[in-house]
Image: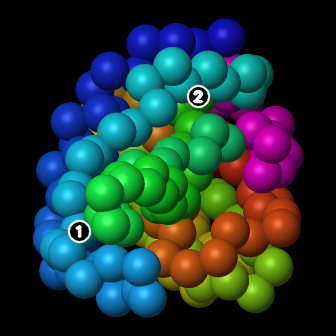
Amino acid sequence: MMKNNNWLLPLLVSGLALLLSVSARAGSCCAAAPLVLEHELFADIEQAAEPIYIDGVLYQLTKSDFTPIYISHYIQAGRERIRVERLVAYTLTIPVYGDIGQELIFDINGRSDGYAMDLSVSCGTFSAGDSGDKYVISSRMTTEQSCTSMRLSFAVSGSAPSFIDLSILIAEAF
């Protein structure tokens, strides 16, 4: 189990603060006051995915392998402040073993249930992304032994998907 994802917190807060700054007013029947933003990410991210070994094994991931990330904010309703949580991402960090400087093939494919999301993937100097509800990433490169931890993130802009299926293959090029 991985618990040390403190590097992710500042990155998400800065990116999400920008997204939330454009919607700084609540437009409901209960509040005429501006939205008070308080960014809180759940810091106790625990992830149970098995490590990826660079040897051509296909790894299958589902929604339950990812950690949901929420942003909390408050709206003013009369004298009361109401806390509202909004899902903004699903993230996962997986250790990767076997990058000894060889050329690698990265194949990442998957789908979600019709809700468009932005998938971003990085491992050392490798970085790629795709968006929509079907995801296809295929790349060959040498990462100079920097691919030791794969980071996957789905940015959610609407409703939460009921499922995420993703397959990952990292193999040595022939």
The amino acid sitting under disc 2 is: Ile
* Number of numbered discs on residues: 2
Q: In this rendering, does residue 89 appear at all? A: no
Front one among 51 and 71? 71
Q: Colour scheme of this structure image?
A: rainbow
Residue that label 1 marks: 35
Residue that label 2 marks: 94
Residue 111 sits above or below residue 42 on the image? below
Please state the horizontal and vertical placement of residue 105, each as a whole percent of the image: 57, 51
Which of the image's four quarters has the N terminus? top right
Lower position in the chain sequence, tag 2 or tag 1: 1
Please state the horizontal and vertical placement of residue 83, each as a whole percent of the image: 44, 51
2 vs 1, front mark: 1
Q: In this rendering, does residue 60 appear at all? A: yes
Q: Is residue 6 left or right of residue 94?
A: left
Q: Secondary structure at mark 1?
A: loop
Identify the residue at horizontal 62%, vertical 39% (top origin): 67
The amino acid sitting under disc 1 is: Leu
Q: Which residues are magenta?
A: 51-65
Q: Is residue 155 left or right of residue 134?
A: left
Residue farthest toward the front in the current orientation of the protein: 79
Q: Is residue 61 magenta?
A: yes
Identify the residue at horizontal 32%, vertical 21% (top origin): 6
Neighbours of disc 1 within 10 Å: few (<14), some (14-19), many (20+) = some
Quarter occupied by residue 40: top left
Please state the horizontal and vertical placement of residue 133, each as a whole percent of the image: 68, 82
Residue 41 sits above or below residue 76 on the image? above
Between marks 2 and 1, how big is the CA–CA gap? 36 Å
Q: Secondary structure at mark 2?
A: strand
